[in-house]
Amino acid sequence: MKKALKPLIAVGILATVAFAANVENPLYAPAQFGFYSKTGFSSMYKQSDANLAMKAKDWEYKSEHILRGYEDFGFGLTDRFSLRGAFGYTHDFSIERSGPHNARLGIGYRAINKPVEAVAWDFYMDAWLGGISKMKANLIASTSELREIRDSMPLSFKYDNYANGRWGIWLGTQVGKTFDRVTVSAFGEVQKTYGNNNNQIKIEESAKAVVNGMVKASVRPGIISAVCTQVAVSAAEQVWCRDNIDKNENLKEVRDTVDSRASGIAKAYVSGLPDDFNVDTKNVWDYVAGLKTLYEINNNWSMGGGFTWRHRGANGVEGVNITNTSRIPNVPTVDAITKGIGESFKGSMEDGVEEFTLSLQGSRQLTKNLQLTLFGEYIFDTAEDKAQLGSDIRVEHGLRLNWQF
């Protein structure tokens, strides 16, 4: 009887080893001194949504064609500890935006590893490396033909890259179990990125025209008060002048004087604007949770899928770092005007996004060390009014080569 069982036990052990060696297995982890790499390329089709940010740029429901690259890797320090990294690059041809969209480097720990019960419980901590490069954007005027849209969002951002310019930390955990040839796992992650001013925002000419109007509107009340004081004798006449300057034709000459002075101040102020400025951003929290599964058809073929929810927290601005070199003799001063404009940027950027991703994949073991995977994802989301990442349709498909030794 024992002799008869030995071959069956051996086959079972070999099958378990072969299954665990599948890099696409959600519970895969490199053994001590083992190394794995997952290199992927994909194409994404995206159709923008119709939130305020897209309407302000006349980009609602427009198509975008995107290429993306991925590199995930890991190295086993011991059978329980491993180094891990994940990097990604995106190029959007339609909106001329490109750069790293992912940059993580950290360590993983397998707290529970019970081969007999096929149960695993992992913890991991990654450094978020978004601060390696600056967040770069252009400040532009909203181009919508609708007055209510321009009034709601007179200025908009055209982002040059996908970096957020911030450093941060990811903390995550995953628990899973293998049932014969099926593996299922659940995971959860939390990310905190720390606010800074590692960003560069260029001021486009169209934005300067909007700033010109903002300055005129901000200084006009003070100029009206000063001019009415000069042209009117009594206090009652001064009040009447201030109250009726924009609706009484008898005050047209006074109104023209006010508008001329306001235009002069606005023009001088805009001429002293720098080419770019930066802002102080707030800390941001992101949350991720999901399910993964893999079915091992045989030692060469496998298929899997998953569902992921991600909360992208809204960014916030604490301060605006901008200087102006113009010399304006009138009140309010340059600093007062700059402070007023800066206040309009402060607060939430209202760009949070809730993402939901459905994924499918199929893999073929080409050699003992090399595996080919085809994958596809469908992402649907709900985005806040000023989010740039929101979409009506987002579909991605691609392939990746996995190798290990």
Image (cartoon, rainbow, N blue to C red):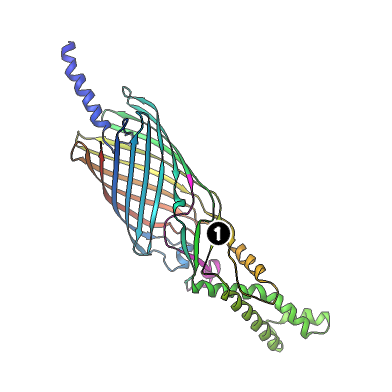
* Vertical comparison of 299 with 88: above or below: above
Any part of residue 177 in sight: yes
Any part of residue 385 in sight: no
Point out the image quarter for the C terminus: top left
Q: Position of residue 253 (x, y in %)?
A: 69, 89
What's the residue type where badge 1 is placed? Answer: Val
Quarter of image, res 92:
bottom left
Q: Residues within 10 Å of mark 1 (few under 14, many from 20)?
A: many
Q: Position of residue 325 (x, y in %)?
A: 60, 72
Point out the image quarter for the N terminus: top left
Task: Specify whether 179 is left or right of 132.
Answer: left
Residue indicated by mark 1: 279
Report if residue 148 lies within the magenta region: yes
Furthest toward the top, the residue is 1
Residue closest to the eye, 82 or 40: 82
Q: How many marks?
A: 1
Residue closest to the eye, 55 or 314: 314
Residue closest to the eye, 11 or 136: 136
Identify the residue at horizontal 68%, vertical 71% (top origin): 333
* Vertical comparison of 42 with 291: above or below: below
Report if residue 254 lies within the magenta region: no
First to last magenta residue range: 145-168
Identify the residue at horizontal 18%, vertical 16% (top origin): 6
Label 1 SS: strand
Q: Position of residue 23 (x, y in %)?
A: 28, 37
Task: Specify whether 153 is left or right of 70.
Answer: right
Q: Position of residue 264 (x, y in %)?
A: 62, 81
